[in-house]
Image: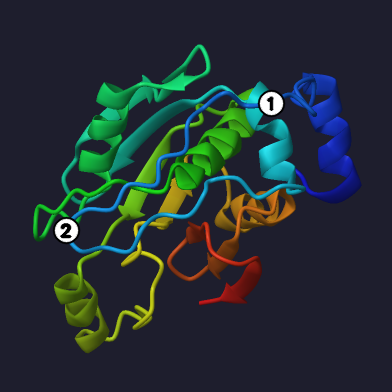
C-alpha cells in the first residue's frame, strides 16, 4: 500500500483501474431515520476512490473491537446493493452502547473495501477492526467528558465515519493510502495506532 505515483503504478499492475470511466449502477442510499440528517450522495466525481469503485471488490471482513462481532461479506452484487448484507454491516457499525443502528454512508463502506482490497493485493489478510462507527449524541458526549478527544461535531454522529485498524499494516500507511484515495477526512492517531476515515470534506489531521 503506497501513495502518489508509486500507488498509481501498483494499482495499474493490479488492474484496479480497469473500470475507470465506467458507470456504477448502484443506487444511492440516502435514507434518513430517527431524526438524523439525510446522507449525501456517496459519489465524489473526480476522486480516486470514485474512479476505482467500478473495479473494487465490495468485500469487507470486519470485527467490532468492543462486541467481538465479525462479518465477512460482499455488500453489493451485480451492480446493486445487497440489503441484507448492509443491515449486517449497519449492526456491526452501530452505537453498541445504545444499540442504535441507522444506515451508514455507503461511501465509508466503499472506502474500507478499497483499503482492505489493496492490503490483500499486498499479501495481507485485509481484515479490519472497527473501533468506532456510528455514535449517538449521548455516547459522543460521554466520550468527550472522558477526554478521549471526540469532536462535538464528529462525523461519527452523522453516520459517515469509521475508526479502524488493518491487520498487518501500520496505521500511518493506512492513512497515507486513505489520503491518496481522496476519501474525505483522514485522521492519524499514531499513539493509539488507528486511522479515522470519513466521507466529509477532504482534510487531514493528527490526533
Residue 89 placement, left or right of 34: right
Residue 32 placement, left or right of 12: left
Q: Farthest residue to the left: give it.
A: 98
Q: Earlier in the sequence, mark 2 or mark 1?
A: 1
Q: Nearer the viewer, residue 169 or 50?
A: 50
Residue 120 placement, left or right of 167: right
Residue 145 placement, left or right of 167: left
**Residue drawn at the location 30% of the way across and 25% of the way down:** 83
Q: Nearer the viewer, residue 183 or 30?
A: 30
- Residue hosting label 2: 34
**Residue drawn at the location 62% of the way across and 57% of the way down:** 175
Task: Assign a secondary structure to mark 2.
Answer: loop
**Residue drawn at the location 20% of the way across and 40% of the way down:** 91
**Residue drawn at the location 42% of the way across and 58% of the way down:** 161
Location of residue 151 with respect to 46 vertically, above or below: below
Q: CA distance from mark 2 to mark 1?
A: 32 Å
Classify 10 Å Cα crowding around label 2: few (below 14), some (14-19), many (20 and above).
Answer: few
Res 23 label: 1
Q: Farthest residue to the top: give it.
A: 78
Q: Quadrant of the N terminus?
A: top right
Q: Number of labelled discs?
A: 2
Location of residue 2 with respect to 97 vertically, above or below: above
Res 148 label: none
Estimate the x, y position of residue 42 in percent, counting from the top left.
53, 46
Estimate the x, y position of residue 117 in percent, counting from the top left.
59, 29
Estimate the x, y position of residue 63 in percent, counting from the top left.
30, 38
Task: Assign a secondary structure to mark 1.
Answer: loop
Estimate the x, y position of residue 181 in percent, counting from the top left.
69, 48
Amino acid at each position: 500500500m503506497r501513495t502518489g505515483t508509486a500507488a498509481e503504478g501498483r494499482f495499474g499492475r493490479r488492474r484496479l483501474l480497469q473500470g475507470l470511466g465506467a458507470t456504477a449502477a448502484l443506487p444511492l442510499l440516502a435514507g434518513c431515520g430517527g431524526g438524523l440528517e439525510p446522507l449525501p450522495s456517496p459519489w465524489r466525481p473526480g476522486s480516486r476512490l470514485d474512479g476505482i469503485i467500478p473495479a473494487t471488490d465490495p468485500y469487507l471482513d470486519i470485527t467490532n473491537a468492543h462486541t467481538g462481532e465479525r462479518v465477512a461479506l460482499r455488500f453489493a452484487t451485480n451492480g446493486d446493493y445487497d440489503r441484507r448484507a448492509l443491515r449486517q454491516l449497519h449492526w456491526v457499525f452501530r452505537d453498541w452502547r445504545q444499540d442504535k443502528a441507522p444506515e451508514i454512508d455507503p461511501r465509508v463502506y466503499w472506502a474500507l473495501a478499497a483499503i482492505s482490497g489493496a492490503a490483500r493485493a499486498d499479501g495481507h489478510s485485509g481484515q479490519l477492526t472497527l473501533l468506532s462507527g456510528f455514535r449517538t449524541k449521548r455516547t459522543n458526549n460521554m466520550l468527550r467528558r472522558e477526554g478521549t478527544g471526540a469532536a462535538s461535531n464528529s462525523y461519527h454522529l452523522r453516520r459517515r465515519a469509521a475508526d479502524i485498524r488493518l491487520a498487518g499494516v501500520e496505521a500511518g500507511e493506512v492513512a497515507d493510502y486513505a489520503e491518496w484515495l481522496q476519501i474525505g477526512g483522514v485522521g492519524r492517531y499514531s499513539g493509539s495506532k488507528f486511522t479515522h476515515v470519513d466521507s466529509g470534506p477532504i482534510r487531514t489531521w493528527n490526533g
